[in-house]
Image (spheres, helix red, strand yellow):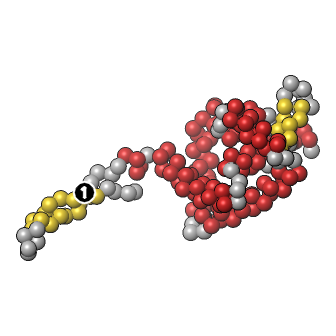
Amino acid sequence: MTVALAAAIDGVDPLGKPMRRIAEAKPRFLDSYVPYLMAQASYLISAQFHRHLAAKGIRTSVWRLLATLAQTNGLTVGELADEMLLQQPTVTKIVDRLVIEGLVERASSPDDRRKVIVDLTARGSALIAALQTEATQHQSAVLAAYSKVEIETLFRVLRTVIDRNGAREWGKPRLAAELRDRRKAEKD
């Protein structure tokens, strides 16, 4: 835990200048506030990979959408928005761009012609496969300083935090994952 330091005057030096003593002050609230710490860790780790993507000319939104579609049989824009934690109009704009770039395609749902499914094209699949390899390498580099037990604990705690804090009740990411798994099982 980070502790803020405070300086206090504590006498004078031999030349008569005031000397300051460093004393521990009260810890800052944010230094023990879990949502802040999780957001800060996410930001710092993600920013490293996002810089890597930017150097390759790939927008973070493209990475997120392609990664969300990977290993699925396609998702609706609503399901993508839920999993990406974005608003549907924002996702629609990203999808529009990626259709033009030939990375994703839209198709009518075989179950409900009113629904449109967004899926990866061959080009999008190839790109996300390469990016997932790079993301895995980045994650390995980030976690290299931790023991296997620490890494397993980290994953377990993060998944537990998500599950115990409304993922099922809130339902959106969980629901999209369940729909994706159901579609995959139906297709197999």
Residue furthest out toward the bottom: 14
Task: Answer whether residue 181 is visible to the viewer in this image.
Answer: no
The C terminus lies in quadrant = top right
Q: Can you give x and y, in whole percent of width and height, for residue 115 in the image? A: 84, 28
Is residue 138 positioned above or below 157 on the image?
below
Task: Identify the residue position indicated by label 1 in the image.
Answer: 6
Q: Position of residue 92 (x, y in %)?
A: 74, 34
Q: Return the residue found at the far top.
A: 114
| Badge 1 density bin: few <14, some 14–19, many ≥20, Cα 10 Å | few
Element at badge 1? strand
Depth check: give the residue in front, 168 or 78: 78
Q: Nearer the viewer, residue 159 or 12?
A: 12
As drawn, is 155 to the left or to the right of 72? left
Q: Position of residue 55 (x, y in %)?
A: 66, 60
Task: Determine the image quadrant of residue 174.
Answer: top right
Please give the name of the residue rendered at 90% of the width and 29% of the height, measured from the top-left corner.
Answer: 111
Q: How many marks?
A: 1
**Image check: 186 left or right of 133?**
right
Q: Quadrant of the N terminus?
A: bottom left
